[in-house]
Amino acid sequence: MAVGSQTIRFFLGEELQEVRGLDTNTTVLNYLRLQAGRRGTKEGCAEGDCGACTVVVGRPVGDHVEYRAVNACIQLLPTLDGCQLLTVEDVRSSTGELHPVQQILFNRNGTQCGFCTPGIVMSLLALSQQTGPISTYERQLALVGNLCRCTGYGPILDAAQDVSEKIEGTPEQPWQTPAWNQLQRTSPLSIEVGEKQFFAPQSVQELIQLLDEFPQSILLAGGTDVGLWVTKQQQALDTVIYLGEIAELQTTAFDQKGLVLGAMATYQAALPLIAEHVPALGALIERIGSMQIRNVGTIGGNIANGSPIGDMPPPLIALNATLYLRNSSGQRALPLEDFFIDYGKQDVRPGEFVEKIHIPLPPKHSLFNVYKVSKRFDQDISAVCGAFYVQLDAMPGEGREPLIVAARICFGGMAGTPARAFHVEQRLQGNRWNEETINKARVMMDQDYAPITDMRASASYRLQVAKNLLRRFYLESYMDRGAARIDRQPAVSR
Ligand SMILES: Cc1cc2nc3c(=O)[nH]c(=O)nc-3n(C[C@H](O)[C@H](O)[C@H](O)COP(=O)(O)OP(=O)(O)OC[C@H]3O[C@@H](n4cnc5c(N)ncnc54)[C@H](O)[C@@H]3O)c2cc1C
Ligand code: FES
Ligand code: FES
């Protein structure tokens, strides 16, 4: 790989920053508060949960700039190379007037102690950059990653409504458009500070070379898992290879056979395509973390992390997705379920990285749904995540009871890996799609799973939920979709 640049360059507001010699594990939040003297951005949890550290990152995409809310506490500074970073200090106009978002929050009494307020301002600012009307649902989605301990969410949601009415799809930007050409680089970022190295290859080929040269390196995608290794586990990440500059890994496409998602496709980037073709999967994605997490977190990272409670593997396994891995020996494809060998152990060969995921679309006469059960509706990790796919010979409610041709059921939170319910599936296949079959199949969960008790749920609760979800899946197949779903209700009704 060509010798790269040692300097991280980005705009902080309108000002060009050129950072050299700083620990490559430095978070954006620590840079802001300890180096740049911008203390408006707060630290609450340092793990992406509370939103007090929310900043807005502008990134050129084609001929426009996308402004997105992110959690500064778990984002590593070198990932900002080529971007514009906006904090609450950038929001006031040059004459000192409050930005409409701030003024509205003030008018609506949406702030008391003020600790959460800069983060909420930045989340609303990101929302206000959206063109076109903003719905109640979108306002809620934009704010679920911002916790407030004193004000109560009513006034904050009122403010969000006023913001969307005031902005009316015409974003207001108090900052000047930066001279983006100043950030263009001819060689990839390649930083060495003390024992630590940070590389940002710009192509798959460069990535392969780096992995051959540094086989022990840590791959960094959105950093919503990796960032916490630094902030919570106090780990030193010696050699990091950041994947965010590789355009080939970010593509999302729909072809005759299904959806193809590059490993670096973020949840938010992949959401429109997924929601269009597999709506139940889209609904699940909207419950992953918060907007700040989904703006940077990737589906590839969720899979590669190998967690038994990651939300994407159960539905993708139920849909029979294929995982593509690559190293210098070439590309390898395997059924996603075979990737998860044991708790903390995945089928990854030396120098391999996740390249893409292929998701076949459910064919005619098939049913698919996925249910996330967690203590809170939003911004929570699953206690149980159950995904159900059945292929029938006719649709339910079309006269006769359909025959079950095939079934694929996968759960997260029930074993050390995402795991299929093979006994349940066998009990379903070849039988009629009716109450009797479901009742006989439900009890087979006892043979498929021996879940553990932990802080999220007891073993018996998990088993009971798994059985109930199968029944719910069945009952919903005879209802209008949505009739039995516990969908997001407006938090405040007016
Ligand atoms: C506040 C918060 C809420 C969350 N909520 C949820 C939730 O609701 N549901 C859920 O499932 N998860 C949740 N997570 C976990 C996390 O957001 C997801 O697992 C996310 O998809 C990880 O993706 P990432 O791009 O951030 O991965 P990273 O953190 O960058 O990487 C994760 C792991 O994958 C490896 N990796 C990344 N990309 C590749 C690749 N292409 N090839 C090989 N290895 C790779 C990394 O080396 C690392 O081991 C949450 C996290 C936080 C902080
Ligand atoms: S400090 Fe809580 S999300 Fe960053
Ligand atoms: S105003 Fe105090 S935490 Fe929100």
Image (spheres, grey):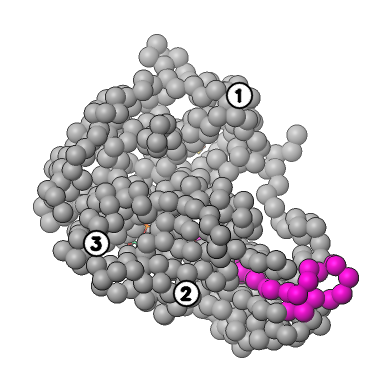
**Disc 1 element:** loop
Q: Position of residue 261 (x, y in %)?
A: 46, 57
Relative horizontal placement of residue 234, taking residue 259 as reference (left or right): left
Counting residues from the start of the chain, the first of labels 3 and 1 encountered is 1
Question: Could you say which is closer to the camera, residue 437 or residue 47?
Answer: 437
The residue type indicated by label 3 comes to: Ile
Span colored in magenta: 379-404
**Which residue lies at the image location 53% right of the left edge and 57% below the top edge?**
255
Q: CA distance from mark 3 to mark 1?
A: 46 Å
> Which residue type carries mark 1?
Glu
> Do the residues bearing badges 2 and 3 touch, measured as CB atoms within 8 Å?
no
- In the current view of this chain or complex, which residue is farthest to the right? 399
Provide the secondary structure element on which disc 2 rests. Answer: strand
Give the number of the disc on residue 335.
2
The residue pinned by badge 3 equals 208
Q: Quadrant of ligand 1?
A: bottom left
Above or below, 233 relative to 171: below
Identify the residue at horizontal 29%, vertical 74% (top origin).
349
Q: Is 211 inside the magenta-drawn segment?
A: no
Q: State the image coordinates of residue 202 (x, y, percent, origin top left).
A: 26, 49
Closest to the observer, 326 or 280: 326
The reply to whether the residue tagged 3 has its Cβ within 8 angstroms of ligand 1 is no
Residue 266, above or below 41:
below
Q: Residue furthest front?
A: 256
Label 1 or label 2, whichever lies nearer to me, is 2
Residues at marks 1 and 2, CA–CA distance in whole angstroms = 46 Å
Q: Image quadrant of residue 448?
A: bottom right
The picture places residue 66, in percent across and down from the top left corner, at 43, 35
Q: Is mark 1 within 8 Å of ligand 3?
A: no
The residue that appears at 34% across and 58% down in the rendered structure is 226
